Image (cartoon, rainbow, N blue to C red):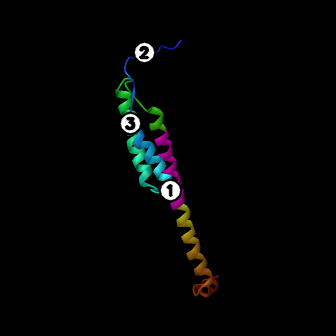
Amino acid sequence: MTEQTHSNQEQITSAWSIISLIGGIANFVGFPFWGAVVALITGYIAKSEIEKSHGQIGGERLAKAGLILGWVGIGVGLLTVCLSILMILGLFGGIALCGPLGALINSVQ
């Protein structure tokens, strides 16, 4: 059996959780990396604020959504950086084998 508390006051939504969700969405719309950083920082601040309020401040699901979007954005950003580095290394490797250094590399073998 779960215990429910009934309060006469309305639960207000944490502004930090709203900012976290906006930052998470902004990460995919036009502010890659910075939107994710904002979403993560404000998401953790919102979760802390909500826990300390003992039920008077809501918005935990908004903060959780912002955190998820923030971490997904960081992951996609890291994957993009890694793939970009591999692409650049492949480009330079292809130039070295087919360009003027190709004869030098083939003569060593």
Q: Is residue 93 found left or right of 55 in the rendered image?
A: right
Q: Position of residue 45 (x, y in %)?
A: 36, 38
Mark 1 or mark 3: name the one nearer the start of the chain: 3
User: Which residue is rendered at x = 48% and y = 34% of the image?
Assistant: 61
Residue 45 lies in the magenta stretch: no
Q: Position of residue 58 (x, y in %)?
A: 41, 29
- The answer to whether 6 is drawn above or below residue 108 in the figure is above
Mark 2 or mark 3: name the one nearer the start of the chain: 2
Q: Quadrant of the C terminus?
A: bottom right
Amino acid under label 1?
Leu
> Spatial distance from mark 1 to mark 2, Cα to Cα?
45 Å
Residue 78 lies in the magenta stretch: yes
Q: Position of residue 54 (x, y in %)?
A: 37, 23
Pointer 2 residue = 6
Callouts 1 and 2 close, C-beta under 8 Å: no
User: Which residue is rendered at x = 58% and y = 88% of the image?
Assistant: 100
Span highlighted in magenta in the image? 65-81
> Spatial distance from mark 2 to mark 3, Cα to Cα?
23 Å
Q: Quadrant of residue 13?
A: top left
SS at mark 1? helix
Amino acid under label 2?
His
Which mark identifies residue 78? 1
- Frontmost of labels 2 and 3 is 2
SS at mark 2? loop
Pointer 3 residue = 46
Q: Main secondary structure of the magenta part?
A: helix
